[in-house]
Image: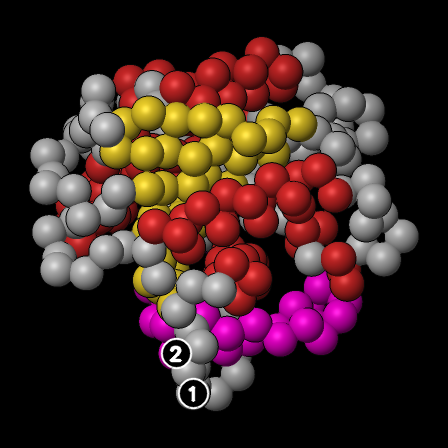
Amino acid sequence: MPRSGSLSVRPVTSIGVIARAVVLPHPPLLVPELVPGSVESTEAVRSACLAAAAELAAAADQWFAVGPGAGARTLGARARGSFAGYGVDVPVALSRDAAGAAEELPLPALIAGWLRERAGANSVRVRLVPPEAGELADAAAELAELDRADDRLGLLVLGDGSNRHGARSPGSQDDRAPAFDDAVAAALGTADTAALRAIDPVLSAELGTGGWAPWQVLAGYAEPGRWSARMLYSGAPFGVRYHVAVWERG
């Protein structure tokens, strides 16, 4: 669980191999086969995610994804898996030539691979980050190191907002959720790294927010004033707030 005051990540100056980043949610409902009765009602967030992924693929054929995880772990591009655990055997590969044995992949990796395939990118590696200050700092430092590589790289940041929007939401209604996610949307939509770093980790946990750790990594990596952003979508179709934004290095 995030701890108040635990974050010590600071922006890292980098030379700019990563020119574009996209911030997306990672719910199973993005995959039409998993929600056969709700494809139409989930189309808005799905279309926004696919549009953002297409923009990322246009900037870079290779991606690096950061998503939430109970423990730190990096999944290489050779990994393959399936959404079978979510009800339908929709296969997923993290690269075009993935040759590893199929394994049980965590949801952020499944969504990253699914988006990669539909956007036509070559590969994606996925780093799972727990909400611990040391892990957040390490992940931000890794992004800065990757930013000094020779090849272009796209950054995919995966994380959901609060799951407590409305009486039928997964986490039950919390009247603090709308203001919380409005502030997150404003920060993501303006590339405001200071506002992202200022998100209260205790409140975030109380509101069932899945994106806190990945957003902190982005805020720790992205140099203030060097990025612009566009919000493509922000809504809570089933009681969970989803934000879709595209960040461009200026």
Determine whether, in the image, residue 178 is placed left or right of residue 54: right
Residue of label 1: 99
Determine whether, in the image, residue 47 is placed left or right of residue 117: right
> What residue is drawn where x is 33% and y is 19%?
192
Examine the structure image and report whether residue 71 is included in the region drawn in magenta: yes
Residue of label 2: 78
Residue at the far front: name it. Answer: 58
Examine the structure image and report whether residue 31 is included in the region drawn in magenta: no
Numbered range of the magenta stretch: 70-94
Out of 183 and 62, give the one closest to the viewer. Answer: 62
> What residue is drawn where x is 43% and y is 35%?
246
Location of residue 48 in the rendering, given as x and y in whole percent from the top left corner: 60, 40
Image vertical order of residue 176 relative to residue 33, above or below: above
Location of residue 120 in the rendering, given as x and y in whole percent from the top left corner: 48, 64
Location of residue 17 in the rendering, given as x and y in whole percent from the top left corner: 18, 48
Structural crowding at the residue carrying mark 1, measured as other residues with C-alpha within 10 Å and reported as few (<14), some (14–19) or many (≥20): few
Asked which quadrant contains residue 237, the reply is top right
Determine whether label 1 and label 2 are within 8 Å by CB: yes
> What residue is drawn where x is 39% and y is 19%?
190
The amino acid type found where label 2 is placed reads Arg
Location of residue 166 in the rendering, given as x and y in whole percent from the top left corner: 77, 23
The amino acid type found where label 1 is placed reads Ala
Out of 113 and 198, give the one closest to the viewer. Answer: 113
Determine whether, in the image, residue 20 is placed left or right of residue 103: left
What is the quadrant of the C terminus in the image? top left
